[in-house]
Amino acid sequence: MQSFIYSLREDASIMVDGLGSFLADAFHYLTLFAIGATVAWSAITAFMGMLSRGHASIDDILLLFIYLELGGMVGIYFKTNLMPVRCLIYIAITALSRLLISDIQAHHQPDMGILLASGAILMLALSTLAIRKTPDNAEKPSA
């Protein structure tokens, strides 16, 4: 009798673990799809705005690059289940570059904000170099 109860408990545990894994995977894929769809929708909306204005500024083009990197990051995460940290850094560099260009176009004079944004871009660029040169990535080709 005790063996039967133990066997029943084991079977129930395996079934519940399988169901939990299925639900976690379903949530994972549904969330990734929602994020990817939101990025695509935002990129299309931004592009349609550029078409309706009849021109694209450098801000608009950099924004499209941000959307491109976000979409690529979602795709990489979807395929590998690994968060590509370098993509996040590239997005931050592009966003800071966009901020820097907007600030310069608006104020036309040097100030501390330009120096801080430039320093942040430099630190992010150096961090990508550090990530590429880690022992774990030394023998893998960089993407």
Image (cartoon, helix red, strand yellow):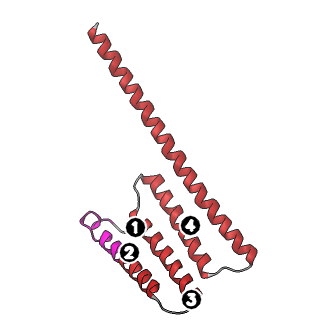
Q: In which quarter of the image is residue 101?
A: bottom right
Residue farthest to the front, as pictured: 112
Label annotation for residue 107:
3
Three-letter code, disc 1:
Arg
CA–CA distance in space, label 1 to label 2: 10 Å
Q: In which quarter of the image is the C terminus?
A: bottom left
Magenta segment main secondary structure: helix
Disc on res. 86: 1
- Identify the secondary structure beneath mark 3: helix
Mark positioned earlier in the residue sequence (4 or 2): 4
Measured Cα–Cα span from mark 1 to mark 3: 31 Å
Residue type at numbered disc 4: Tyr
Please tell me the numbered disc located at residue 67: 4
Which label belongs to residue 124? 2
In this view, the residue farthest toward the left is: 135
Drawn side of residue 141 relative to residue 106, left or right: left
Residue 121 counted in the magenta span: no
Labels 1 & 2 near each other (Cβ < 8 A): no
Q: What stretch is highlighted in magenta?
A: 125-140
Question: Which amino acid type is marked by label 3?
Answer: His
Q: What element carries label 1?
A: helix
Residue 107 coordinates in the image, percent (x, y): 56, 89
Disc nearer the start of the sequence (1/3): 1
Tell which of 136 and 98 is nearer to you: 98
